[in-house]
Amino acid sequence: MDLGLKGKVAAVTGGSVGIGLAIAHGLAAEGVHLALCARNAERVAQVAQAISAEYGVRAIAVPTDVISCDDIRQYVDAIAGEFGGVDILINNAGTGSEETILDAPDERWQYYWDLHVMAAVRLSRALAPLMRERGGGAILNNASICATQPLGYEPIYNVTKAALVMFSKCLANELIPFNIRVNTINPGLVMTPDWQKTAKLLTAGKDTTWEAYLDQIAKDNAPIGRFASPEEIANLAVFLCSPRASYCVGSTYYIDGGWLKVIT
C-alpha cells in the first residue's frame, strides 16, 4: 500500500534507539526525510547517516535533550534551516521510572514532567505553525498502556504518560481546523534495549537467563504471549501519520497484545 508520504519531512525525538529508531526506519522506507534528535550525539549521527544511505532520503541528526528549552530551540532551528518546514512530528523521547510516591522528591517529578509532557508541548507549539504553512500535518505522541493501566513500581511514569494522552486530545481539538491531525499510541510490552538492560541486571548471578525472565513477563501479562518488536509499533505509527489515516483524529490507539484489561 502506498501511504502517500514520499517527500514529506518528519521530526522524530528519541530517534536513535528502540521505538523511535523503528519509526524512523518505517518513515524513511516510505520516502520521508528525517530530522532525528537524541541525547547521544555520536549514535544519532550514525543512525541518520545509515538511514540516508539505505533509503536515499535526507536525514539530519541534532543532538538534543528534550527537557532543555535551549536544545529544543536549536532542534527546531535546524529543521527549519535544513528543510524549511515539517509535516510530521513524533514525540517519542521518554523512559521508565522506578520509585514510590512517598519517597520521590519534587525534582524527580519535574524531570519526568519535562521529559514526557513539556517536551511534547514545546515541540508541538514550535512546529505546528510550520505544518500549518505547508497545509497541514500529523503529530503522534508515544504514551504507554500505563497511562490507563498503571504499573505499581513507576507512579511518575504512569502519571506523566496519562497527562500526555490528555494533552494529545486537547491539542487535537485545537489543531484539526488547520488540517493537523494529532493522535496517541499506547504500546504495551515492547522489546527495547531498556527492557533488556533491566532484565540482565535482575537476572545477574541467578539461575535464569534474561531472555527467560522477559519471556515469563510476556506470558504473565500479554495474552499474545510475547513482547512486540519495535517494528510492530512503528507499523501503526507510520500509518497514523499518513494520509491513509485521514479520519483518525484525537484518538489513542492501544498496541499491547491484548494486555489492557478493560474496554476503553
Image (spheres, helix red, strand yellow):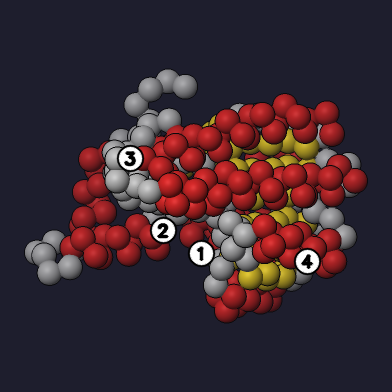
Q: Determine whether the residue tagged by mark 1 lies in a helix, strand or loop.
A: loop
- Residue 192 bears which disc, if any? 2
User: Residue 64 at x, y = what percent?
Assistant: 63, 66
Instruction: First in sequence, mark 2 or 3: give its number.
Output: 3
Q: Quadrant of residue 46?
A: bottom right
Of badges 4 and 2, the one in the foreground is 4
User: Residue drawn 42% across and 20% down?
Assistant: 263
Q: Earlier in the sequence, mark 3 or mark 4?
A: 4
What percent of the width, then of the height, locates residue 211? 25, 60
| Secondary-structure class at tag 2 | loop
- Determine whether label 4 and label 2 are within 8 Å by CB: no
Upstream in sequence: badge 4 or badge 1: 1
Residue topped by disc 4: 78
Distance of mark 4 from mark 2, alpha carbons? 28 Å
Tag 3's secondary structure? loop
- Which residue in the protein does label 3 denote? 101
Observer-nearest of 39 and 197: 39
Q: Amino acid at mark 3?
A: Ile
Q: Secondary structure at mark 4?
A: helix
Give the residue at x 69% y 48%: 122
> Closer to the N terminus: mark 3 or mark 1?
1
Q: Which residue occupies 21% across, 48% down?
A: 216
Nearer the observer: mark 4 or 1; the answer is: 4
Marks 2 and 3, how far apart in space? 26 Å
Q: Which mark is residue 17?
A: 1
Q: Is residue 12 left or right of residue 176?
A: left
Give the CA separation, mark 3 to mark 4. 38 Å
Q: Residue furthest left?
A: 207
Rounded to the nearest angstrom, the CA distance separating label 4 from label 1 is: 21 Å
